[in-house]
């Protein structure tokens, strides 16, 4: 029987901190900063961070990579008695992987109103029509998780704006009568 691991508030914070470490690693690579870890017997047994751009893989989400690493670590596709910690609400694909891996508990940070599939757009992990339901705890270190994302997108917008301004300046030069 799958058991839902029980954690103290300090443990929840500590495991989410590990997911945040992974999120920052993604950010350092220029990836959208999202990180995840899988916990088993009160230990982090697998980690993952978003590598979609680096690997040019649509499936390279933090959760998928962490789940795959946990499958390898335990030598099993079943991740019963584990818990997944992720900095952003899982998408449809990742919710599907969580169900298929039989993970009993998911803790996530920021909600994702545009793509979230566990509380926002869909509640896949609580769908009684499926043969596996997942305990979901939302809003763990949500501020820190969200701030990482907001800072990232702010930088992207600033870089785009700067690039646009530089291009305009270059175009002006081209039009200059003095060459
Ligand atoms: Zn995902």
Image (cartoon, rainbow, N blue to C red):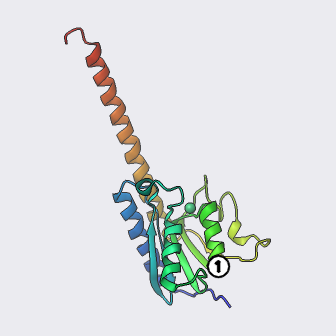
Q: Quadrant of residue 59?
A: bottom right
Residue at image point 62% right, 59% down: 116
Image spot of residue 132 (x, y percent): 72, 77
Cβ of mark 1 under 8 A from ligand 1 = no
Residue 159 falls left or right of residue 141:
left
Residue at the right extreme of this rendering = 129
Residue 121 falls left or right of residue 60:
right
Which of the four quarters of the rendered structure image does ligand 1 lie in? bottom right
Using the image as rendered, state which of residue 122 and residue 47 is in the foreground.
47
Image spot of residue 35 (x, y percent): 45, 67
Query: Quadrant where the N terminus lies?
Result: bottom right
Work out whether residue 9 can be spotted.
no
Residue at image point 51% right, 62% down: 61
Label 1 packing within 10 angstroms: few (<14), some (14-19), many (20+):
many
Using the image as rendered, state which of residue 119 and residue 22 is in the foreground.
22
Query: Quadrant where the C terminus lies?
Result: top left
- Kind of element beneath mark 1: loop
Image vertical order of residue 2 relative to residue 29, above or below: below
Residue at the top extreme of this rendering = 177
Q: Which residue in the structure is indicated by mark 1?
A: 102
Residue at the left extreme of this rendering = 179
Image spot of residue 27 (x, y percent): 38, 58
Image vertical order of residue 62 relative to residue 4, above or below: above
Using the image as rendered, state which of residue 120 and residue 174 is in the foreground.
174
Work out whether residue 7 can be spotted.
yes
Image spot of residue 118 (x, y percent): 65, 65
Image vertical order of residue 173 relative to residue 177, above or below: below
Residue at image point 43% right, 57% down: 55
Q: Quadrant of residue 125?
A: bottom right
């Amino acid at each position: 029987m799958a058991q839902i691991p029980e954690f103290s508030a300090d443990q929840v914070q500590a495991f989410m901190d590990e997911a945040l470490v992974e999120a920052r690693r993604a950010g350092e690579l220029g990836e959208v900063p999202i990180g995840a870890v899988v916990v088993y017997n009160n230990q982090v047994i697998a980690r993952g961070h978003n590598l979609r751009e680096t690997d040019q893989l649509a499936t390279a989400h933090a959760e998928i990579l962490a789940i795959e690493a946990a499958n390898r670590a335990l030598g099993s596709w079943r991740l019963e008695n584990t818990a997944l910690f992720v900095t952003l609400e899982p998408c449809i694909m990742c919710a599907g992987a969580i169900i298929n891996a039989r993970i009993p508990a998911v803790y996530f940070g920021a909600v994702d109103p545009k793509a979230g599939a566990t509380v926002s757009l869909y509640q896949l992990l609580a769908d009684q029509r499926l043969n596996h339901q997942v305990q979901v705890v939302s809003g763990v270190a949500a501020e820190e998780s969200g701030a990482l994302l907001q800072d990232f997108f702010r930088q992207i917008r600033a870089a785009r704006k700067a690039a646009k301004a530089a291009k305009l300046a270059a175009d002006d030069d081209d039009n200059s009568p003095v060459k």
